[in-house]
Image (cartoon, rainbow, N blue to C red):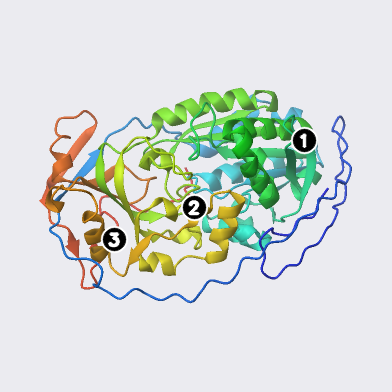
Amino acid sequence: MFANQPLLNPSASARLACATSPSTSAGAPAMSPIPIPIRMAVVPPAVPYHSPPAGVYVRAVPYPRMVRVRQHVEAPAVVDVPLAVRGELERIRIGGCIRAGESVAITAGSRGIVDIVPILRTVVAVLREAGTAPFLVTAMGSHGGATAEGQVKVLATYGITEASVGAPIRSAMDVVQVGTTEEGIPAYVDRLAAAADHIVVVARIKPHTDFDGPIGSGFLKMLAIGLAKEIGAATCHRAVFEHGFERVLRSVGCTVLARSRIACGIGIVENAAEGTAVLEAVVPQEMETREEALHALASRLMLRLPVDPIDLLIVDEIGKNVSGLGMDTNVVGRKPHGDGGAAPRIRRIFVRDLTPETHGNALGVGLADFATSRLVRAIDYRATVVNALAAAHPEAAVIPVHFESDREAIDAALGTIGLAPPEHARVVRIQSTLRLRTLEVSEACAAELGGRAGLEVIGSPQELRFDHAGDLEPRVPAATAPRSTAREG
């Protein structure tokens, strides 16, 4: 067992420690201390930022006019989230596998799940009514700067606090090794979760940003990476180069599943209307197969851009609450390792800002071609680099060409799309890859959308509007409301 310091910590020195062996319940495998040596790397402080001079790199170009479009999509929804959670836990007879007085660790991750607070609060309430002692553990790999305090702050961003969920929140970066896969990959679990009598895995299930397959982000990723903290996340991502992402997630996730005291999982599938489509409690022996079924549903419900190809995609916000890589690669068609050929075909991507919820973690900014200097100034260098190295995606943290104003960035982007006149360019603007119901498209795109099922063109073409600083107005398309991450359901 291993007490882990962040792998990348400017103030830490190398050390080796062992954690105390967690208590075991009947039938649970005993785990012996396994010291794991880690050589510390140091993330240097960021160099002083210097803004580029305005207006010296690009020439003004004519802009296409933009039309607002709304996508009408299938959006099944859970009407009463707390009632659904209770019903699911009763369906699998959760009370039959836990006993009064036992402790239960509940995973809380770093994604912006719309109904996460009522979901967690209800799980806590049901477990407490059964006489157990539930608590939340931060389960987000290297996020939050790979510190215990940083991960608690990430949860607070989503409204997840001890007061809101009715249970203690415990956070540490220490892990224990619970086993080794047949490929030789060590499987780790958060020390606090491993010491509990039971673990409840709460996970949103959706396509992964790094690979395509019958599983993606879900139970197995939470078990293999989220619960494994920084060392487990880094280990899994390194193993991907030899074994592929799906095999690593299945192998490590199933090893943790077999060697830990997992009580159940709560699978969450969201709809394209930013609500909860499905809530399903899953027993451990069905976790892998049910994840595949829920993944297929999530893929079918997922919104995508209605236009292909695109000369310029303008993204108002990127961040970890949107996607692990700031913007969903399944939407923008770009993978972190530079894999090409995925739809849609987008020639240039311009990102304007970071979400407040990402706390400066700009992983994924390297997928873009252009950015604003205000986005670059908002980057937390250490949090971004720690996450990039743990994810084995250093290229995803590379800062693109950036300009002080939106106008300059758009001028530059439209000057690099080929021979098409800028005023006739195929341009799309979205708030984020998580919010695609309402978007703006240029006239060249709108001309082919008329009459297409599920699409509604709203209003007449409008000129791009900039404020006195050269930034787009309005910042966020007015037809989209702020996304709540703490809805009561």
- Find residue 395 and name its label: 2
Instruction: Locate residue 236: give its quadrant.
Output: top right
Amino acid, disc 1: Thr
Marks 1 and 2, the one that precedes in the sequence? 1
The answer to whether 19 appears left or right of 118 in the picture is right
Residue closest to the far left: 460
- Percent position of residue 185, x then y: 72, 37
Instruction: Locate residue 371: give its quadrant.
Output: bottom left
Amino acid, disc 3: Arg
Q: CA distance from mark 1 to mark 3?
A: 49 Å
Q: Residues within 10 Å of mark 2 (few under 14, many from 20)?
A: some
Residue placed most toward the observer, 405 or 168: 405
Instruction: Locate residue 267: give its quadrant.
Output: top right
- Reading the image, the residue beneath label 3 is 475
- Reading the image, the residue beneath label 1 is 180
The answer, for residue 458, to whether it is visible in the render is yes
Tag 1's secondary structure?
strand
